[in-house]
Amino acid sequence: MSRTVYVNGEFLPEDQAKVSVFDRGFLFADAVYEVTSVLDGKLIDFDGHERRLARSLGELDMAAPEGDLLAIHRELVARNEITEGLVYLQVTRGVADRDFAYPKDTPSTLVMFTQAKGLIDSPAAQTGIKVIAIDDLRWGRRDIKTVQLLYPSMGKMMAKAAGVDDAWMVEDGLVTEGTSNNAYIVKGGKIITRQLGNDILAGITRAAILKMAQEAQMVVEERAFSIAEAQAADEAFFTSASAFVMPVVEVDGATVGNGKPGPVTRRLREIYIDESRNVAI
């Protein structure tokens, strides 16, 4: 069955959905996006995603899309019968003749679609994943969630070519983040993750996990760490809307801890899933 997608006020079969060749998202990657998880047919961390979207739009002086985003999300989930999966939202600056300067008073383009995907019963969450280190060659405003995802895509292909699952990006000798996730290590029971700034995305799952960790009396330290520190850590993991809390058991060829998902990582994943289900909307 064809998915129903949303384009500029209309719910359409995916094969009938169209965006102009002059859309700035296509011509300039002049667009931002969000991904909201769905569990039990309900949205996880929606308020956080909506706030971050507003921030991204503001940082780029881009018009907010029209419509009730929560209602549209819910309608897409219902129409596509998504019990577990993801809702992708993308906003572009809209359609205008090609010019580097921003067009004036151009209505934004809003596109949304769903993906059915198993999130909880993830085989990788049981075994852990392996990552390599790559240079972080992205632009300097990674705090804005734009659709400029070519280098992260290249990073995932580098990981695939190396026979591992993903890559952690490194700048000035320190890990920034994963290709599509925030990175963490655990040492002596302390959870360590890079502080927020222009060099990483303020992950919505990251914020939820750190809050839950502190409520569970876990110690959190927000600072950058090196690949060597990660290799010598007791545990490592990453967080994202689509993976929740994902254990990392190998970093750049070195086994982390005993090579299995550690107790802190497993507990955080359990807490996040339980709490998210309780507050999903």
Image (cartoon, rainbow, N blue to C red):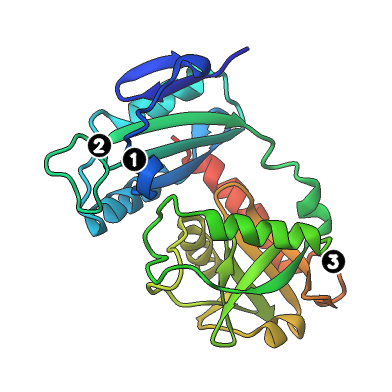
Along the horizontal axis of the image, is 173 left or right of 106?
right
Q: Earlier in the sequence, mark 2 or mark 1?
A: 1
Q: Residue at x 36, y 60 (%)?
A: 144
Q: Position of residue 166 (x, y in %)?
A: 71, 61
Find disc 1 in the rendering and name its residue: 91
> CB under 8 Å between callouts 2 and 1?
yes
- Residue 180 position within the rendered picture, expressed as x and y whole percent measured from the top left: 57, 57
Quadrant occupied by the C terminus: top left
Outermost residue to the right: 258
Q: Disc 3 marks which amino acid?
A: Lys
Please name the residue that numbered disc 3 is placed on: 260
Residue 279 as seen in the image, left or right of residue 31: right
Identify the image quadrant of residue 227. Answer: bottom right
Q: Quadrant of the N terminus?
A: top right
Q: Secondary structure at mark 3?
A: loop
Q: Secondary structure at mark 2?
A: loop
**For discs 3 and 2, the disc positioned in front in the rendered view:** 2
Measure the alpha-carbon separation of dots 3 and 2: 46 Å
Q: Is residue 153 visible from the viewing direction of this image?
A: yes
Please give the name of the residue rendered at 20% of the width and 43% of the height, measured from the top-left corner: 63
The mark that comes first in sequence, 3 or 1, is: 1
Category of crowding for the residue at label 3, using alpha-carbon neighbours closer than 10 angstroms: few (below 14), some (14–19), many (at least 20): some
**Residue of label 2:** 108
- Which of these two is toward me, 78 or 28? 28
Image coords of residue 42 (percent x, y): 50, 32
Q: Amino acid at mark 1?
A: Val
Q: For this rendering, which residue is in front, 258 or 8?
A: 8
